[in-house]
Amino acid sequence: MAIQDNLFERLYNVIHENQLQLARLANNIEQLDLGKGMATLTDYESNHEYKRNSLVVDRVTETVYRVTPRNGTSYTSITVEQDCSDGNLKLVGFESQIIPFDHEPTQYEINTVPDGAMVAIYSPSDTPYRPASQE
């Protein structure tokens, strides 16, 4: 019977030690900051602090921008136009597309346009285009 008791005691000790190790591992995993793994889009707001690599949407144009603070890891927003001009926002996903500007682009804006993209400068006061089928 002593051998059997010793065997069960050793088995109990092994199981107990495994439980303690699993608890330590679980605690260590909970301490890791793994992020969410998915980008979240939020509506752009003026006078709001944004952290680098956040994605914001201009409510007027439905255009998506990535936050790229020129100084530090965050910045406080002014307007979409001003933030783009200052280099704090960058257009997302506009490679191989036409990029419209309703103003003469700044050098910084030109520098952020990827190779192969076409820039179109237009005037908001121009007569709107109407297809021939609607005239």
Image (cartoon, rainbow, N blue to C red):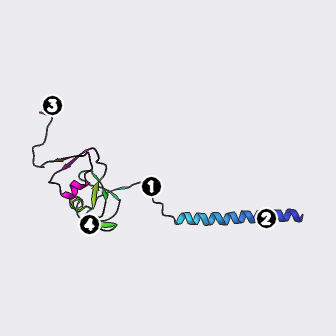
Q: CA distance from mark 4 to mark 1?
A: 27 Å
Q: Which residue is mark 2?
A: 10
Residue 81: within the magenta?
no
User: Does dot 3 land on a helix, a strand or a loop?
Assistant: helix
- Counting residues from the start of the chain, the first of labels 2 and 4 encountered is 2
Crowd around label 2: few <14 · some 14–19 · many ≥20 (10 Å): few
Instruction: Identify the amino acid type marked 3.
Output: Ser
User: Does dot 2 land on a helix, a strand or a loop?
Assistant: helix
Q: Foreground residue, 101 or 44?
A: 101
Q: CA distance from mark 2 to mark 3?
A: 87 Å
Q: Which quadrant of the structure image shows residue 54?
A: bottom left
For image coordinates 32% across by 66% down, the residue present is 74
Image quadrant containing the N terminus: bottom right
Q: Which mark is residue 49?
A: none
Asked if the residues shown at circle 1 and circle 2 are in contact, with their CB atoms under 8 angstroms apart, the answer is no
Question: Can you say whether 74 is above or below 102 in the image?
Answer: below
User: Does dot 4 land on a helix, a strand or a loop?
Assistant: loop
Q: Which residue is mark 4?
A: 47
- Counting residues from the start of the chain, the first of labels 4 and 3 encountered is 4
- Counting residues from the start of the chain, the first of labels 4 and 1 encountered is 1
Q: Residue 79 in the image: state x and y as whole percent.
A: 22, 61
Q: Which residue is mark 3?
A: 133
